[in-house]
Amino acid sequence: MSLTEEALKERIRQGYLVESPEEMTEGYKKALIQILLVQADTELMSAPAYYMAACTAPSLNTRLSAYAIIQDELGHAHITFRLLEDLGLDKEYLIFGRKPHEFKNPYGFDQPLETWVELVVANAFFDRAGIVLLSDPFENTSYGPWKRALAKIDKEELFHLRHGEVWMKRLCQAGGKIQEEVQRAVDWMFPMGVEWFGMPDHLKRHTAQLEYKLKGKTNDQLRQEWLSAVVPLCEECGIHVPAHYDAEQGQYVLDYPLPCDYDPERKQWLFDKPITWDQVFERWKRRGPYNEHYVGMLQRQYRRFAALFDGNGNGSVR
Amino acid sequence: MSRNREFSTPHDLDEPTRQALYDLFLVLADTKHLLGLRYGEWLGAPAIEASIASVAMAQDEFGHARLFYGLLREFHEAGIPEREEVPSEYRNFEGLDRVWDSWLDFIAANVLVDGALSVQIESLQNSSYVPVRRMVAKILQEEAFHHQHARGWLLRLAREGAKPKAELEKALKRIWEPLLQWLGRPGSEHERALVEAGIQDTDSEGLRARFIERFGPLLIEEAGLDLPLSSDAITGQWVLGTALSWEDWDDAFRRRSRTGPDPETFRQIESFRKHEYPVGS
Amino acid sequence: MTRGNYAMPMTDEKTSVQLTEARVWEALKDVNDPEMPISLVDMGMVYGVSVDPQERAVTVKLGLTATACPAMDFIREDVTKRLCQEGFRRVEVEWVWDPPWTKERISEEGRLLLSCWGISV
């Protein structure tokens, strides 16, 4: 009982929820795996990045909050890898068997988060991106198991967001050097967030994901949603961002060319060096400076531990 | 003996008891703090479920450390000066000074260190010092999960082959003696003061007896591990085969040396003070 | 999260309404656990309230689900904000560990809500 592409898309248009691999076409399954893998890897790789910053936490309480967030992110990764397992993929291989460059997390989580301030801004910007990106499938996705998993994930991400926003405001209220430090973090992390949402709609749409209704909104719509939360937050904090609301267009517009070049060593965007999206994809593919380090942290014990069981006929760690 | 008395603040205690209780709380706070740091380092556990459990347990330890550090504040108000923030002033269990090399060290500490901490904290369940008595039940409720986790991994490692079992034994032996000592030196001023004031319900030998009664059956009978511990054929009582040497032992620090956490670890603790952020209370 | 918790308009600024304990309990139903989509009351976290109407002061005893609660600041802030809306001038939050909070303290309604969010208790 093979299902044709057209029949599946028609069902989905009528609001039907896909529940298992038997109800999918190859095309649907491929697109679903792709989008889930990006989510799983994003959640997973945020953990070592946040951990690195947590080591600079200014108190036991703040370190504790950071750990709570890290645990949530690992939990979300776990849930999402389980969804991939149900689609026939090997969870253990996905986490421990892949090479660093094979992980599909955004470029932002290839960067070192070096201070408490950067963690706070990451919670406010990157977790906001996560919420925007995941609220969409939570409302719109045609894949039932994912929709249900996102209910819990969404709630917890809201806590991370509040953590980021409260701390950003608190730090900026202190003014002076501390506010300047927030500004420096925002200077590299804001354009990182903008780029997170990918190519603008007029250049390319990820049609498969939209046609299968894995998600409901386009890159530009999602980017606008993110900007409409992040720009006012920064304004309230007295922090400058290179974007503003344009009343005539009824949307946020950027004050710099997207895309443009980035120097990861100096954590600096080169607004005077516009590039093409192909060049962006190349930069992503080259990976950021902490990609190997973060994957190394996560895979630290796996092989060594598995080796303990060699000769017992039991290579599995589970 | 003052078993019927209750103490609500450090001011109610005589000088030696106040100092002994302060020392106990600081040892517990620093040890739980460092244990939390060590647990938290295991994002790279051999399975993602284990990484999640590690970060969860790290938070519990921080939560408990926060409670004990909180108890210390009143002691400072009662005249005991705050310690100098240098590694040599830290009173954590010495097996927590450095990063653990392997996941087996993690499990060894999860069983033994967490276990010894719980035995010590249980002895405060009916404490005459009211502020600590009120938090014991909550701490032990959370520790029950740690014990379950430790037990599950211990039995799995011990039963799944000679190699993991041998490595596990090595890891346990690395901390075996200092850990048993950590429960206290028999006849010390500290334990005398705490037991006499009804703060702690037994002395160090009593704590050690409880510890081996609890862990003997698990380590020796269930897991079949080779450790210097056995049960008496006639009485069934567990007997320690390790003679503890108390040379260089510091009763206040519950350590043999005052080296404290290594520089990399201490740098992280130091960040609690070397900043200008408005962290609030 | 506590989005939309403070939407309730304050119509009785004149303080003609008495500051009673029942009213505090009612108001606390609007304050959610920052990590759970249900109120502190349904979570069974409220161990007691005591009101001093003369001083317009209230003390709320809260039992946290975990000693490592990362949201103590948020909870204190949310409770204070909500009770100030009720007309209190001084709000104190006291953390209680004894008896420890357990899942059994969650109300029937709370359980129902949590199961809707896919959280089993």
Image (spheres, coloured by chain):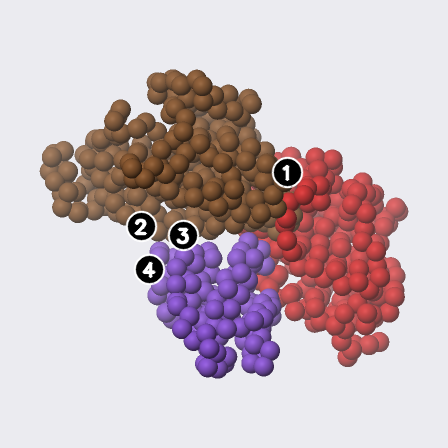
Q: Residue A264 at x, y = what percent? A: 51, 23
Q: Is residue A237 visible?
A: yes
Q: Position of residue B162 (x, y in %)?
A: 58, 37
Q: Are marks 1 and 3 in contact (CB under 8 Å)?
A: no
Q: Amino acid at mark 2?
A: Arg
Helix, strand or loop status at disc 3: helix
Distance from label 3 to label 4 (Cα)? 13 Å
Q: Counting residues from the N terminus, which is met first, the one under dot 1 or under dot 3? A: 3
Q: Is A139 placed left or right of A104 in the picture? A: left
- The residue beneath circle 3 is A155
Q: In the picture, which chain is red?
A: B
Q: Which mark is residue A148?
A: 2
Given the image, on which type of amino acid does mark 1 rest? Lys
Which lettered chain is shown in brown?
A: A
Residue B14: assigned label: none
Provide the residue designation for mark 1. A177
Viewer-nearest of discs 2 and 1: 1
For the residue pair B241 and B28, the one nearer the viewer reads as B28
Q: Give the chain ID for the purple colour.
A: C
Residue A88 location (% of width, % of height): 31, 36
Q: Are marks 3 and 2 in contact (CB under 8 Å)?
A: no
Q: Earlier in the sequence, mark 2 or mark 1?
A: 2
Q: Residue at x 25, y 45 (%)?
A: A140
Give the letter of the chain under mark 1.
Answer: A
Residue position for label 4: C116
